[in-house]
Amino acid sequence: MVKFYKMHSLGNDFMVLDAVTHECTLSTEMIKRWAQRHEGIGFDQLLMIAPPQQPDADFHYMIYNADGSEAEQCGNGTRCVAWLAQHLGLSNKPQLTWHSKGGVLQTKLLEGRAPTVIETTLPVPSLAPGDVPFVASSQANTAVLQADGNDFEITAVSTGNPHGVIFVDQIATVDVATIGAALSTHEAFPNHANIGFCQVVDRGFMRLRVYERGVGETRACGTGASAAVVAARSHDLVDAQVKVSLPGGKLRIRWSGPDQPITMAGGATLVFAGELVLKE
């Protein structure tokens, strides 16, 4: 038996496992079965808090999509694992360093906030096509790709995982499921990508919907919100601090420019805890 925790941040929901005090060996089929919303626990991603593999880290952070594939980074998930690490007594430090497949990040519990607000500092983002990776004929990070019989100008960004951002005039009418699925697996993204549809309202506010690879449209995506701000800043559409409204709620993103890390602030919620048997 192993204990699990169902959590969410802005409706982006997770199954979280403590692999520090319990050994957890997972298979792709197990993850896919648990991810089913009608027959399993149901989640966008499965997150694992694991012992550090680097001397400068407090924990190793592992992310698996609902289809069982491993992801490099998950921004909203960082707040959930940070909250849970303190809740379980795995650490009493308000500021933690995490190593993930997508790089090093820090989380910080902001004192005196009710409900709890956690600030995450993500690695320095990149607009270099090779870092995403993004392969287009122009070898630039912005290109026109075809999907569903239409052309879409997309800006590629790495926030530790690959993103493509499309700017739209009216986000409510976008067919995120169809267009997002086609672009997520487009040959221009050899590792596949998360696709964000962004409506810039003014220089400090935008609306965003995200199709996550291996998941589908999600209620919120922290790295997607960060990528949208980076893409918008690269086109001089927004300022350094932006409120991003997603279907599940709002995030505050700050990025001062090239060679600087991204910070985001938001909450995390424990929904319930349970136990399951680790078996194939």
Image (cartoon, helix red, strand yellow):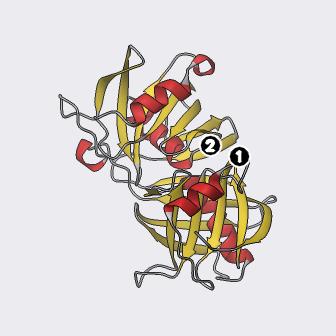
The image shows residue 127, relative to residue 280, as above or below, that is: above
Write the residue at 73% across / 61% down: 6
What x and y, as percent, mark residue 258? 34, 47
Residue 157 image label: none
Mark 2 is surrounded, within 10 Å at the Cα level, by few (under 14), some (14 to 19) or many (20 or more) other residues, namely: many
Residue 11 image label: 1
Observer-nearest residue: 7 or 262?
7
Q: In this view, does 127 lie to the left or right of 96?
A: left
Residue 72 occupies quadrant: bottom left
Secondary element at image label 2: loop
What x and y, as percent, mark residue 145? 32, 23
Residue 220 image label: 2
Give the residue type at disc 2. Answer: Ala
What x and y, as percent, mark residue 214? 49, 46
Q: In which quarter of the image is the C terminus?
A: bottom right
Residues marked 2 and 1 touching at CB (< 8 Å): yes
Q: Is residue 166 left or right of residue 221?
A: left
Observer-nearest residue: 196 or 128?
196
Q: Is residue 8 left or right of residue 200?
A: right
Write the residue at 41% across / 59% down: 123
What x and y, as percent, mark residue 185? 38, 36
Taking the view exactly as shown, the residue that stands out farthest to the front is 280
